């Protein structure tokens, strides 16, 4: 562990508790500003992984994150945000955390060392060759994440490593390695800081860019969102209006006719089709709104 950059100690770190609060905040902010550059250095690896994930998901596969502690919580968070943002079916994007759901809000001692639990949880999902497993670990050597990637690869699933140290065992075990070198933390070894921020940025990219490749957006609009509350219903209304330049009464009528489905409502407004025709056009085009519009000459 002492050889890992994420466990290292920054020069001058021994006296940070003697700094004034504003000076300490500036120091932490300066450290945080290095993270986007570290992520930028691995963008080719991110893009290659996204293309491979999207190809598997086109075949009906799932995206599964597996990690412990902060890494596991970030995976659970990213998975949980996919249904409302992109309209993914429950279970299409899954977050597994060492120690189970309770570990999201409380530390479960020893869970990260439980390789057997990772294997059992993947087996419970009925993992197939169409699925992808992303092991997330700042150190790149967490047994739970490592076992998940090794087992998934043995089953023929696509595997991706997201680690905070180059040349990690997790990277060696996976087909795609994304190793973001964020270096020593403000608090030595506290990888919920820069390493965790880098993981959040990359997970955002993996899910968002994969969904863009799958046609779950239209330009920069979230046309597959699930409008399950007042805020999201207002957002669905605004997205439909932006995509069509239609008047709000017409937008409201289209959304009502399609049960709140934004893609369908856009097709109604831009092509003059009916709800059944919109649904059929989207089905023919794999849910891709742009293709469905082109088919109708729009």
Image (spheres, rainbow, N blue to C red):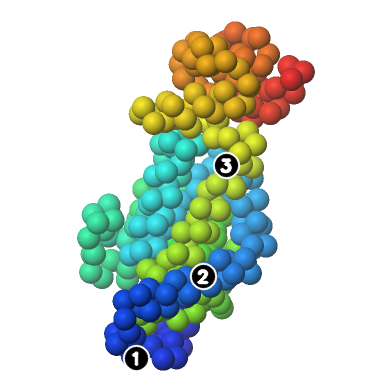
Q: Which residue is mark 1?
A: 14
Quadrant for the C terminus in the image: top right
The foreground one among 40 and 28 is 28
Residue 10, quarter of the rendered image: bottom left
Give coordinates of residue 173: x percent, y percent. 53, 69
Q: Earlier in the sequence, mark 1 or mark 3?
A: 1
Q: Secondary structure at mark 1?
A: helix
Q: Which residue is mark 3?
A: 211
Give coordinates of residue 150: x percent, y percent. 48, 64
Discs 1/3, front: 1
The foreground one among 130 and 193 is 193
Question: Residue at image x 49%, y 65%?
Answer: 198
Give coordinates of residue 238: x percent, y percent. 52, 27
Q: CA distance from mark 1 to mark 3?
A: 44 Å
Q: CA distance from mark 2 to mark 1?
A: 21 Å
Q: Is residue 191 above or below residue 249?
A: below
Q: Secondary structure at mark 3?
A: helix
Q: Is residue 85 left or right of residue 118?
A: right
Residue 148, quarter of the rendered image: bottom left
Label placed on residue 33:
2
Q: Is residue 259 above or below residue 89?
A: above
């Amino acid at each position: 562990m002492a050889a890992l950059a994420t466990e290292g100690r920054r020069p001058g770190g021994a006296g940070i508790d003697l700094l004034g609060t504003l000076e300490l905040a500036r120091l932490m902010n300066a450290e945080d500003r290095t993270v986007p550059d570290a992520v930028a250095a691995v963008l080719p690896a991110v893009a290659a992984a996204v293309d491979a994930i999207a190809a598997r998901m086109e075949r009906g596969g799932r995206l599964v994150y597996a990690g412990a502690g902060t890494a596991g919580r970030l995976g659970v968070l990213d998975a949980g945000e996919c249904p409302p943002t992109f309209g993914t079916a429950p279970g299409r994007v899954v977050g597994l955390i060492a120690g189970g759901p309770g570990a999201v809000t409380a530390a479960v001692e020893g869970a990260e060392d439980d390789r057997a639990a990772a294997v059992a949880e993947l087996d419970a999902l009925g993992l197939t060759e169409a699925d992808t497993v992303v092991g997330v670990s700042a150190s790149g050597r967490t047994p739970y994440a490592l076992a998940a990637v090794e087992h998934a690869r043995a089953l023929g699933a696509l595997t991706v490593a997201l680690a905070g140290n180059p040349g990690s065992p997790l990277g060696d075990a996976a087909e795609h390695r994304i190793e973001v070198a964020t270096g020593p933390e403000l608090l030595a070894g506290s990888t919920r800081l820069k390493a965790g921020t880098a993981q959040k940025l990359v997970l955002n990219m993996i899910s968002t860019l994969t969904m863009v490749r799958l046609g779950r957006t239209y330009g920069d609009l979230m046309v597959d969102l699930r409008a399950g509350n007042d805020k999201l219903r207002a957002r669905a209304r605004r997205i439909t209006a932006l995509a069509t330049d239609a008047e709000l009464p017409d937008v409201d009528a289209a959304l009502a006719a399609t049960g709140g489905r934004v893609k369908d409502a856009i097709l109604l407004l831009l092509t003059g089709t009916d709800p059944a025709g919109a649904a059929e056009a989207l089905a023919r085009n794999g849910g891709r709104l742009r293709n469905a519009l082109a088919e109708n000459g729009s």
